Amino acid sequence: MKNRIEQRRLRHRRLRQKVQGTAARPRMALYFSNKNINVQFIDDDAAKTIAAATTLGTDAKLNVATATELGKKAAEAAIAKGVSKVVVDRGGYAFHGRVKALVEAAVAAGLKISDKEPAKEAK
């Protein structure tokens, strides 16, 4: 039997086989530690982080309200860098609670979530 951390890492590895960020549609990677929440917007093609937001350096509690505020802050940082569409990499976490609040706040702040590759133009 694997522990919870190993199970989450396996789920994240499976998810990463399907989710890839590009310059036009970066990957919004979420990570929840015991003390902080991190959000990064990553262009996997260039292996660069475009924008980021974190609760590091604050005394914020890890709850839904903090995740909502961080989602707004992350969306503002991404929009300031010219990012409007993203694909969500939830990091193996269930889309519930803090993860859902963070993503919904980012969408409310102006980001568009795309879960599929853009359609190819027909010739």
Image (cartoon, rainbow, N blue to C red):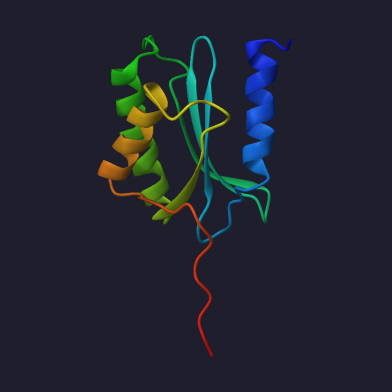
Seen at 32% across and 19% down, the residue is 64
Is 2 placed left or right of 110 in the picture?
Answer: right
Is 95 placed left or right of 20 in the picture?
Answer: left
Seen at 54% across and 15% down, the residue is 33
User: How far across and down, in percent of the image, does residue 36 sit?
Assistant: 48, 16
User: How far across and down, in percent of the image, does residue 35 sit?
Assistant: 49, 10
Q: Nearer the viewer, residue 37 or 96?
A: 96
Is 48 placed left or right of 108 in the picture?
Answer: right
User: How far across and down, in percent of the image, does residue 21 sit?
Assistant: 58, 52
From this viewpoint, which residue is outermost toward the right? 1
Q: Quadrant of the C terminus?
A: bottom right
Q: Nearer the viewer, residue 1 or 23?
A: 1
Q: Taking 16 as reference, is 95 above or below it?
A: above
Q: Quadrant of the N terminus?
A: top right
Seen at 36% across and 42% down, the residue is 75
Q: Taking 123 as reference, is 64 above or below it?
A: above
